[in-house]
Amino acid sequence: MSTFTLHTLDTAPAGSLPILDAAQKGLGFIPNLYAHLAESPATLQAYKQLGALLEQSAFTPQEQQIILLAVSQYNRCTYCVAAHSFIARNMAKVEDATIAALRSGGALPDGKQNALADFVRAVVRERGWVADSPELKAFFAAGYTRQQALEVVLGVAMKTISNYTNHLTDTPLDAAFANEAWQAPDDYACCKN
């Protein structure tokens, strides 16, 4: 059970109110991730700003969701896998087979997108030590650029904030994302080394 507060507009620190208010008006609810992050206005602002910067990157909305889902799945973040499955499916129009592959950690049906997901997973797994990796070579061979390699790091940084926050605070899944609920398998081996 979490010892962290799911803040509302009535309980959140003043510095978090603009983001929470915008979420309430735009989405019709305050996502539980934001409600927990609101405890630290600086962390909530950092998360939102990194997301806004990722939206300005050279990646398409579909590729952005591939990055965010690949990181979240690798980090075993049940909240973010569900939330980004919902966003990928309903807002970015990512194909069902691609979402299923991302949720399982498997190969994506599209070769270029698969090179992206593999590179993202390698960055997370190797903590960025991928300069000579086959994943980086495949990423470049698929047509991605050095700029985009650095923008993968941006996406990893953004998701690290939310994934680790959700692990720390045990964020409950919002009803809006319930149809996309996800649980890492018991034998999930990615993070045991």
Image: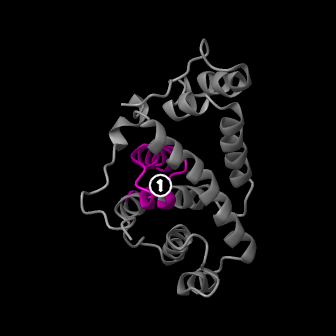
Q: What residue sits 24% from the left and 57% below the top?
A: 186
Quarter of image, res 41:
top right
Tell me the residue at 72%/24% (across/down). Answer: 18
Where's the N terminus, which quadrant?
A: top left
Q: What residue is shown at x 42% (from left), y 58% (from top)?
A: 73
How many numbered markers are drawn?
Answer: 1
Magenta-colored span = 70-96
| Quadrant of residue 187 within the rendered picture | bottom left
Where does residue 90 sit, x and y in percent of width and height?
Answer: 48, 44
Q: Is residue 173 left or right of residue 144?
A: left
Magenta residues, dominant SS class: helix
Q: From the top left corner, tell me how far across and down residue 16 is, in percent.
A: 69, 26
Residue positioned 74% across, 51% down in the render: 53
- Element under disc 1: helix
Q: Which residue is mark 1?
A: 72
179 vs 51, left or right, is left
